[in-house]
Image (cartoon, helix red, strand yellow):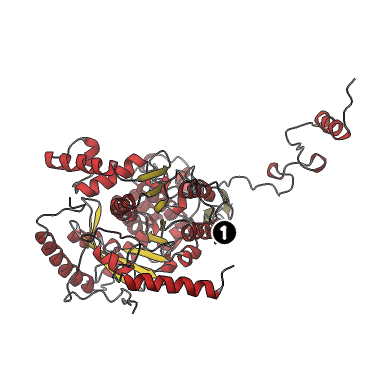
Amino acid sequence: MRTAADTSQELRDEWKAAKANPRFIYGYGRYGDGKQWTKLDELTRGLQRYTLAVLAAPPKSGKSMLAAAWVPFIAEQADEVGEVVRIITLETSPQSYQKRMAALMAGIREPKNIKSGMLSVEEEKKYLSALDWLEELPIEYLDNKKDLTEEQALQFGNSPVSFDDMSQFITGVLPFSVKRGSAVAPPPQRKKTYWWLLDHIGLLKDLRGSDNRTWVLYRLADQLADLAHTYATGLMITHTNRASVGGRPTLASIGGADQIGRNGDHIFLIWRPWMDVNDEDRATVAGAEPSFLIFQSRDEGMGVDTLIWQSEYASYTELILGPDVKMLSLLPPTKKKK
Amino acid sequence: MARLSNSSARFFLSLVLSRSVETSLTQAEFAIRPERGGFVPSITPPTTPIQVQSNQQNREKVYETHVVEGNTERITPPKQPALVPSLREEPEGDEAIPADPLEVCRRADKNASRPDQIAALIACWDEAFPVEEYPYQRLTVATAKKFLVNRTAEDVGQVILRVGALGHSDWPRTRVEKFLAGEDKRGSGGGEEEEGKASDELKEFTKMALEQWRKQNENRSGHKPGITR
């Protein structure tokens, strides 16, 4: 049991520490490196301790690519403190995942050219250099052992990995050790999880053959929140359904169970308005497609990060807009915490 | 001779009395395992098409439908549109079933037969969205009927095939509905506005955003996505 007196003392200590070291990004880490993903860091105030973030978008919107772009930056910070980034990749194998990250880092145009051996000399150099760099980073994978097709990735529970498996992978302790508010210490020799990523919740084995999928999703959402709140901050990827406001995804669009949205301390929703228009119009943004990352949080307010999706690179990049650019009226207003 | 305890004796006796795999020693009195049908109602056998002939003039094929977690479309239909007698029978000469699903649509329109039109649309759908690729997104009779309200089978079939040719879609039905709505607007002289057209606001925003994007890239001297080191 925690009393008001204990909590007040903790808050006093937190304030003293913050006052002694005032800074704009007050999280324990960042999504970027201070040069990239700066707007995102500004919105979120960085990675916050013991929080569950949810990244949601329709299938084939580039959710995994967006998260993969953050991983190297976060892993570098984990390395500095002797901790590990743990990735539960249920849609792709670790090879595919790491190749994706290396391709993003190297800026490979047409990443499929890696498999076909058709990279330019310059690209090859960058790609191999990215692989070398990733090799040094403290990243561990728990995976599905194989790459899923698009259809397979949409089938609930289509992986051999259960929540207990991922919990053990993240915490280093046996399943059932994660109880609300009480952590069981991992073995001392095991490196602590700095940040974890689940890609994606719908593939967890727990959902396989379930008669009541909504109930299982509710339970998983609670367990994932417990895991994040008790052991380490993490990001969970999930699909959205067709419910939206003027095409823009909202919390109600998060597929399966609204508990997922409710349990997330930070919610990221990808909105690609050009995906909904006809093919003729979409062709005008084939090279670079403006998109949005809508951020909502209990404590850090809300806001919008503008992204550019480049299909030939299969990557998102942050776009810092000038004050003269009028944002779309459909976007939620940005409310910053005072 | 070694003596058995009472519980051991009961255990071995239960083995002797076991008659089938349905016997479970873990449950009371050789109860049949629930998952084998002992305590639960038997599972409904797989659905098969059921032909309902209400009368001679209006013969219609009705399928049992499944509700698959938010997907109200029916389970994989038989591949052939051979549900309507006029198509299922093997006519001769000019009456032979054409290979082109659009031709099937035209004939169905010509015959003014709603069941033929529905079967023709299902044939178009099967061609545009093959069952192997879209196992859960099949065209139901109800949806086909909805598509046919104030439209000919040929018009709808053309749209289905056109949407199928655009590439994979996670929600083909929605896409077809959008295209049909767009066709309706054009047909009724509903102006230049087309369903799924980018709004002026989005176009204006995109123009300015891409301008800034180009500037941002110039400042980074050709920087590509990735880590700058």
Above or below, A114 relative to B107: above
Q: Is residue A245 visible?
A: no
* Callout 1 crowding tier (Cα within 10 Å): few <14, some 14–19, many ≥20: some
Whether residue A214 sits left or right of residue B90 in the image: it is: right
Viewer-closest of A284 and A34: A34
Q: Quadrant of the C terminus of chain A?
A: bottom left
Q: Is residue A6 above or below residue B103?
A: below
Q: Is A31 inside the magenta-drawn segment?
A: yes
Amino acid at pointer 1: Trp
Q: Residue at x 36, y 46 (%)?
A: B127
Q: Residue at x 75, y 32 (%)?
A: B20
**Residue A148, percent across and down?**
39, 43
Position above or below: B159 against A4: above
* Secondary structure type for disc 1: helix
How many numbered discs, if any? 1
The one of A322 and A246 positioned closer to us in this rendering: A322
Q: Position of residue B24 (x, y in %)?
A: 75, 38
Q: Is residue A104 visible?
A: yes
Q: Is residue B206 above or below residue B84?
A: below
Quadrant into which the N terminus of chain A falls? bottom right
Using the image, name the chain to which the residue with label 1 belongs.
A
Residue extending farthest to the bottom is: A338
Q: Is residue B172 magenta?
A: no
The magenta stretch spans which residues? A30-36
x%, y% of residue A264? 44, 64
Residue position marked by numbered label 1 in the rendering: A215
Name the one closer to the observer, B81 or A136.
Answer: A136
On the image, the x and y values in percent for residue A62 come to 31, 55
Magenta span main SS: loop
